[in-house]
Image (cartoon, rainbow, N blue to C red):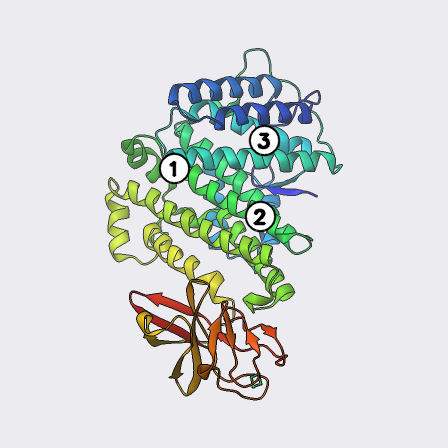
Amino acid sequence: MSVVLPIGGRLPERDATLGFAEVSAGIDAALAAVTGPLTDAAEIGAALRALAATVAVRASVVMPGDADPDAQRGALQSAAPRRLSDDELANFAIYDDYFGVVRATLGAPAFAAVLLGVWAELLVDLARAQIGRDEVEALLRAFRAMLARAGDLATAGAPASEPAPAPADGASSPLLEDDGVPRRWRLGHYAFALAAAHACDAFDCVATSAAPERELATAALMTRATAAAQWYASEFPFEVYRTVVRPTMERSGARGGFSGTQNADYRCMEWARERAFEALFTRFGTVAAAWPAPAYAALMQLREMEIEAAEHHVLVAASKVRVDGSLAQKAQGDPSSAVAVLREKVAAVADDIAGRFDAAPPTRRVRACAVADVPAERPLAVTLAGAELAIVRAYGAIWACAALCTHAGGDLCEGHVAGNALVCPLHGAKFDPRTGAVLHPPATEPLATYPVTIEGADVYVDLT
Ligand code: FES
């Protein structure tokens, strides 16, 4: 298995002596200790700093040179479902240049080094960043899942990268160099890129997985982590954003300016997601009831996470609009602005997955009677939309079933309720009013039953 990791080229390479499993186990244990209590900010900060220091010591991280731009474009084009335009590729290149993000297909060792290097820096600062506790937890969950997946990569026999020379004593990682880009902005985008890479990989595993729910769950977790990473990435003074980040990111002549939706990692996630959905719906069909329950539940969970993540991306963008007059202006009048696009995406995500299933047959929900109308020991006869029904009080609730006995058509509404069973007046057949099941012969076929809801003092029946 290989991962198309957005951070290549200037990749940190792992020290050949690093024992990944050992480091991973240590980090996981430390994370469990950190995320278990999560009660005191100072304690969390101290634990994270200790954890990050451990990681930094164990993982010797250096940064190789830049990758070939043609290779980068080729990697993106191969991930895309269609021919990418020159404009799209130019936008992607701007973003990538800005963060020093380069695409490459990696084996396990380099992947582990990137993961540890980025996170070692990020975890040190995470406890100090003014972001929500949910965001911190989302990032830590993603980190833990990345470690587990990297462990899988390590044991899958992926080709090892050439070991890079260890940095000189006291040398800092280039990730720490201050070149005018806010460190949180850069680190957050690395974390975003890592989460996006994992989401892509999980989506691409859906097609062949015997348990696609696991891959969907990972994709959901990583999708949520991208939003948390953006909160972290944007946690610096607004003035810096307005004067440093925004002018640098603006591409002259680009309608609507620049936005995260033009980030290649974001687009790669979209493409991989679509491939996964095509595979899932080809495999299980468009009838929700025909899906395996775990896969359907995981898909719905992904939908919830995607909606939540999209809403957070809007909030992050809106927090910058407050001080960025040009963006605020675009948000009001330009349909391609970042905020407008993101808002549309929230609405689209909410509809997208549900809209792929066949519409459920419409139900006809009809008021049947008042609760007080249903006697305790005999059924109440009602006619709803031409259907003859027996409304029965049993098991401390109210039930609705067909009024005609399946034995010889006896009128069950002329019968009675005994021991929670509906009894036919003709030959004594008994039915369970909850399920329609036969409890006593001579009937052998169950009764049709109908869902009942109580609203206030009224009984409603769904006629399908
Ligand atoms: S008709 Fe109901 S038991 Fe025969």
Residue type for callout 1: Trp
Residue position for label 1:
231
Residue 114's disc is: 3
Question: In the image, 455: left or right of 22?
Answer: left
Q: Report the quarter where the N terminus lies.
A: top right
Q: Secondary structure beneath disc 3?
A: helix
Q: Residue at x 44, y 79 (%)?
A: 390
Q: What residue type is labelled 3?
A: Val
Residue occupied by mark 2:
200
Q: Position of residue 339 (x, y in %)?
A: 33, 51
User: At numbered mark 1, what does the secondary structure look like: helix, strand or loop?
Assistant: helix
Identify the residue at image location x=64%, y=42%.
Answer: 3
Ligand 1 quadrant assignment:
bottom right
Against 103, residue 213 (above or below) is below
Are the residues tagged 3 and 1 within 8 Å (C-beta)? Answer: no
Q: Residue visible at 53% across and 17% down? A: 53
Q: Do the residues labelled 1 and 2 touch (CB within 8 Å)?
A: no
Evaluate whether residue 426 shows in this view.
yes
Query: Who comes first in sequence, dot 1 or dot 2?
Result: 2
Distance in Å between CA atoms under marks 1 and 2: 21 Å
Task: Point out residue 177 in the picture as x, y percentages from the top left corner.
Answer: 46, 22
